[in-house]
Image (spheres, helix red, strand yellow):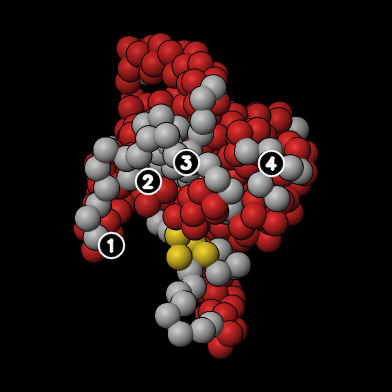
Amino acid sequence: MPPTRLQSIGDIMHIMEGFLPSPWWEIWFFVSLPFIVIGLYQLNKLVQEKREALPLLAVAGAFVFVLSSLKLPSFNGSCSHPTGTGLGGVLFGPCIAAVLGLIVLIFQAVFLAHGGITTLGANVFSMGIAGPAVAYFIYKAGTRAGANTYATVFCAAALADLVTYVVTSVQLALAFPGTAGFLGAFSAFAAIFAVTQVPLAIIEGAVIMLVFKYIVQLKPEILTRLNLLSESTVTKLREAAA
Amino acid sequence: MKYGMELAVAALIVVFAAVFLFQDAAIQATLGDGEEAWGGADGEAAGLIEASGYEPWTGPLWAPPSGEVESLLFALQAAIGAVIIGYVFGYWRGSRRTA
């Protein structure tokens, strides 16, 4: 496949049913499986030890539901949707976010023919693991460095969205290197992402930042309980908003 | 400012919508008869991979029979999420007030 062809599929969100040849779909299943298993274990622990975090977990999952159903027009004349998994990644880490992503991806694959069952492993990896992992590490690094909490959340969520698409393009470039080879195919994608996905990533970052503000206002004790914010930071943020 | 962040996010969305309208006008002007812009990227992608000679080795078990049914299911997905978010935030706010 020449790179000019690949350019036009740069803004695809989920890889469609049957569009990953063997052995790639099996490989991505094996890569994603440990994260899902650890995620289920962490979820079980969360339910037993920190029950008050359950509504927050529901919000994180519901957010993936809402944002991944909104197909927004990207600036190049086609539509694509945000992922919403950045919030789950920041709050609960990539393994639990992988489980939340899996639920939404199964819903979309079964009822909407959006994504697919055989490509579930690859899609869970890009949307549920890679994106949230980036969000999680940016948030940890940002809070450790003492950066503005909301700016950190914004960057974490926006980059989680962007990374999801970069990983999808890596997955497609690996499976369909064409005549350009892996790097040629991948750089063709990456050039398109800069234009296509950045606006959507900014919107997603802004919306998640706003939701984070409401969580700080309404239920800050959950954030301190999950070791996401220190009590002094919570007090500072709440005073700034008063 | 108390609602500074809300205003900033609202302004961002207005800019996003304005750029979309501007871009749309430019695209509509160059579009030929029967062509449609702002389609889903996934379907387009599928056609392009198929054009390279790749045959998908399996297809979806069930697909929404029409665009209307598909948008119903997408709206349902968003509604499920929105109900949960509204419920939890309302619950938190309510319990804060009574506390």
Q: Nearer the viewer, mark 2 or mark 4?
A: 4
Q: Which residue is the site of mark 3?
A: B55
Mark 1 vs mark 2: tell me if same chain. Answer: no
Mark identifier at residue A178? 4
Q: CA distance from mark 3 to mark 4?
A: 15 Å
Residue in view at x 45 percent, y 60 percent = B40
Residue A68 point in image, percent of width and height: 41, 48
Q: Quadrant of residue A129?
A: top right
Q: CA distance from mark 2 to mark 4?
A: 25 Å
In primary-sequence order, the first of circles 1 and 3 is 3
Residue A164 point in image, percent of width and height: 58, 40
Mark identifier at residue A114? 2
Please give the chain letter of the residue carrying mark 3. B
Q: CA distance from mark 1 to mark 2?
A: 13 Å
Please give the chain letter of the residue carrying mark 4. A
Is residue A29 in sight in this rendering?
A: yes
Q: Secondary structure at mark 3?
A: loop
Q: Nearer the viewer, mark 1 or mark 3?
A: 3
Q: Which residue is the site of mark 1?
A: B67
Residue in view at x 49 percent, y 61 percent = A79
The amino acid type found where label 1 is placed reads Gly
Q: Quadrant of residue A57?
A: top left
Towards the viewer: B28 or A214: B28
Is residue A32 in sight in this rendering?
A: no
